Image (tube, rainbow, N blue to C red):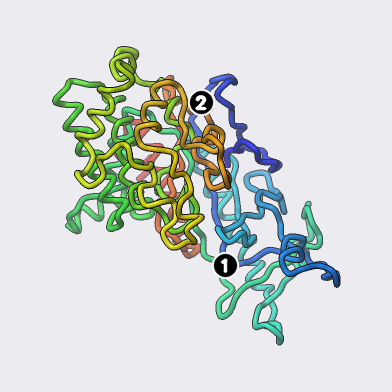
Amino acid sequence: MFQERGRTRKSTSLQSQSNGESKTPIQCLIGYEFEIADWILFKEQERQPEQTDLEYREASSYKKGTLLYEEELWQMVADTDVRRTPYMEFVTKPFPETIEGYGQALDAFSEIRTLCQQIWQSVPEPHPDDNFRYLPLSDVINFLNLADENAMLQTKLPNPAPTFSPQTTAGVVLSELPAVFAKLAGSYLTDPEDLAARKRQGQEYMSTNGTPGSFALRYAVDRSRDLTQSWGLSKHFEGFFSYVLFYLIQAYGGTSSYAKNFTSILARTDFARMFELLPLEEQEWLKENNASEFLDLIEWALPEHANNLDTPFFFRGIFLNMPATHHQMLKRLTRRTWLVDITKGMDRLTERNFPNRLRAYEMESLGAMGDKTDEIKGIQAPILEFRGGRKRLTPDEAEDYVSESFKMLLLLHEGQDTFWGE
């Protein structure tokens, strides 16, 4: 929903800013992405005799970000998974955090859902040769601006019905991060009243509760709160510090796919910019002696098994079940280097800043918006991408996800406990 550096995607959404460009904030917006990985996209074209399997696959595959279809509130684009297989993704425009924006977000998903239903109902019987169903998208979307009339859709047996993998992108003020993180982590308890409260606050569909991410998030929030209270530090510091801890703890375990999947809450505004949002006296204190105080605090707060700052940021390698050449990616980036350079104005955990980067696309989206921030009630807020919600949602669940996640963020920023009219 927010255009990233290096993309050629046509977009009605917001433009990212590099570190050297204007720091004019975005105005309190929420956007959504919905991946439809069930359906594979490709171009219908004849294979040439001289083409190898790889050449034919590349020639018939859509590049990531290719615009296929566009409406006022959303776009349909091609995306790819870690195997570079192209599939379908819907990207909404950013909606203002208002009652009107809430309605627009629901309208956008309703249109997306209707289109997917049309596609599903149009899927023919399986092809006799390979047990896949094929459908020209132009058979369904032939009434507006389909970007490529040769687009084809392939869906696997036995069920072509789409499921939605959602993401939410929004700004959150640093001082609000501990509250957001605590809500998303949930509690270790399973008390029915506690679960009902989390549902009302939009956490049923955004929560990482019950996953390793939830425990990392809860741990980071608790340690940061204890440190902030005992040292008399600001709520902005508490939010920033808890987010740094969360990244470090999650990165310790690596990921089974590409790099950015190590975290369930991805920073689109880079951490160097977040550091600049701290009170000036705290910035100066943390910078002293090559950030030695900052490093000491981090080592104190990290779990015992993960507090060696001279180990690689991805301690076990980015990938867990990949060839050794992939497993070794980013071994040069240590935790110490990442932390110290944040205080000097550079976040190295981004595609733009990682030195001598090999396969730099693995860093896609990490800090991709640079110093761009949202603005909430006059306060600049880093932009985050919430990736930890329940995956593979049915259409009904995905609609609830849009409604509940939007309400949770809107109520947070408005300082309200109940949604209007409820």
Identify residue type, mark 1: Asp
Residue under numbered circle 1: 38
Q: Quadrant of the N terminus?
A: top right
Q: How many discs mark residues in the rendered view?
A: 2
Q: What secondary structure is found at the residue carrying circle 1? A: strand
Q: Are marks 2 and 1 in contact (CB under 8 Å)?
A: no
Within 10 Å of the Cα at label 2, are there few (<14), some (14-19), or many (20+) other Cα atoms?
many
Cα separation, mark 2 vs mark 1, equals 35 Å
Pointer 2 residue: 371
Left or right, 252 with respect to 118, comes to left
Q: 10 Å neighbourhood of mark 1: few (<14), some, or many (≥20)?
A: some
Vertical relation: 307 (above or below) 156: above
Q: Position of residue 408 (x, y in %)?
A: 37, 42
Residue placed furthest toward the left: 230
In the picture shown, does residue 64 fall above or below 11?
A: below
Percent from the top left, x then y, of residue 123? 67, 75
Q: Earlier in the sequence, mark 2 or mark 1?
A: 1
Residue 189 at x, y percent in the picture: 17, 55
Q: What mark, if any, has residue 336 been given in the picture?
A: none
- Foreground mark, 2 or 1, reads 2
Dot 2: element: loop
**Furthest residue in direction bottom, as rendered:** 128
Front position in the image: 410 or 11: 11
| Residue occupying image coordinates x 52% and y 35% | 354
Q: Amino acid at mark 2?
A: Asp
Q: What residue is at 55 percent from the left and 38 percent from the top?
A: 351
Horizontal and vertical percent for residue 406?
44, 43
Q: Residue at x 70, y 82 (%)?
A: 127
Foreground of the two, 138 or 400: 138
Image quadrant where residue 419 sits: top left
